[in-house]
Amino acid sequence: MTGVPAARRTGAPAGAAGSPAAPGAGAPAARPTGPTLLALAVAGMVVSVQQTLVLPLLPQLMTRFQAPITDVTWVFTASLLAGAVATPLLTRFGDMYGKKRMILLALVLLLAGSVVCAVSGSLPVLIAGRALQGVSAAMIPLAIGMIRDTFPAERVTTAIGIVSATMGVGGSAGMIVTGLIATRTGSHHPVFWIAAALAAAGLALVAATARDVGVRTGGRPDLPGAVLLACWLVCLLLGISQGNAWGWTSGGVLALFGAAVALCAVWVAVEMRVRAPMVRLNLLVGPRSLSANVVSALLGFSMFAAFTLIAGFVQARPEEVGYGLGGSVLDVGLYMLPSTATMLVFSAMAGRVAARLGPAYTLAIGSAFAGLCYAWLAVSNSHGYDMLAFSAIQGVGFGIAYAALGTLAVRHVPMDQSGIASGINSLVRTTGGSVAGAVTASILAGRAAGPGVPSLGAYELCFWVVSAGAALAAVIAVAHALRHPG
């Protein structure tokens, strides 16, 4: 146990007397942290790949299973719901029983889900496999919590930035992999066999090299809080994701939103009364947490919008609809390669920027760049170089922003709550992404140039809306820095 501080050996929270510990406080800096960072980055990329690789497959799946789009979209929705429910649960369990254990569990379920999808011969089986895959969404916040436990303070923001950047890298890689396979076969099976192989590699790497030295609080889980949290999240996200398909004023959607509000109220009442709640409410709406979570939702809104908007715009044929780049699924991934490169570079630089300016101002800079990239497309979008410029600027913005956001979300909480704090921040980002899908789909459907064909003005309005969301995130980040200068 040499090299591990006494507070970690005894299980006492870092930052005695209730004061939050600094990021990385007490971390055993003498041991190399490079292998842990490599393992977490690879695993994060694998998880991000599974989130986007199905989007280009949806038209093929409609033909393959002779199913309407409302049924096929459950291939994506099931993963989203499973991830939303699993993220707060596994991150809390990570604080209680060890983050490495929960990361390994998430990767095992990703591997199992990938195999189920790879052998699936029916749509229900494929959806079940995708739900198992979706649990792995908890991996990124667990990794951020492990970094805070393991890394010295001066390296925390950089390490979080590198792991966070894998969300963009994996998203682009998923598009490229699917594009390469879609041009050669109409089967969805090879895509998921590749996902299974990547999951197995990530699992082996984390098991062999990642170190888990954080505080473990132990105790018994708050089962009523966990069940209520899962129920109201499912109602909320299901209502958002199905609003366009069912109608926003339909009885089903209104009932889901009503149930979400009622169950959330019951959940809050339960969490305020139990001794060891599943989620401490100050991690969601506390004075230092609220702004970080609002910014996370806005950046999730901006980033997830890119997955659907850019894919549709790149593949639109100008000779038929008057706009677009006439590209393929593979072209979508290739256009996003500059984002992958700049995201990796600037996420690694974010630590030095945050050391000089602080994470809140750094977050504001990244959010401003994220808003700029969408404003570019709103103004100029008729050439391939417009998409490449958008992609490069997007990588700068999200590379900086997500590195700083991951730090801002956990720096003020005790070490034994870093996992759940990061998990809540990730959860609201997922919620923001769900809202982005609903909002952009409504705009595209409401401004059609023909049956099922959005107009150029609809796309440009979407770009402006998403740009405004990122700009608002920058304003909130600056306000946070001014309000909490320490």
Image: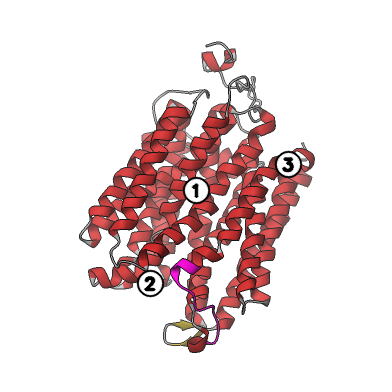
Indicate yes or no whether the magenta region holds residue 101: no
Q: Secondary structure at mark 2?
A: helix
Residue, far front: 184
Find residue 485 and report its horizontal and vertical position in percent.
78, 40
- Would you place residue 161 above or below residue 443 in this image? above
Q: Nearer the viewer, mark 3 or mark 1?
A: 3
Q: How was this image coloured?
A: secondary structure
| Circles 3 and 1: CB atoms closer than 8 Å | no
Label 1: which residue?
427
Q: Residue at x 30, y 48 (%)?
A: 113
Q: Residue at x 57, y 31 (%)?
A: 34
Find residue 381 and report its horizontal and vertical position in percent.
62, 76
Q: Left or right? Give the position of 218 relative to 75.
A: right
Whole-number angstrom distance, CA of label 3 to CA of label 2: 43 Å
- Tag 2 or tag 3, which sits nearer the N-term? 2
| Circles 3 and 2: CB atoms closer than 8 Å | no
Say the numbered circle drawn on residue 245.
Answer: 2
Q: Which residues are magenta?
A: 322-331
Q: Quadrant of residue 55?
A: bottom left
Q: Secondary structure at mark 1?
A: helix
**Looking at the image, which is closer to me, 298 or 454?**
454
> Taking the image as drawn, is residue 378 in sight?
yes
Say the numbered circle drawn on residue 354.
Answer: 3
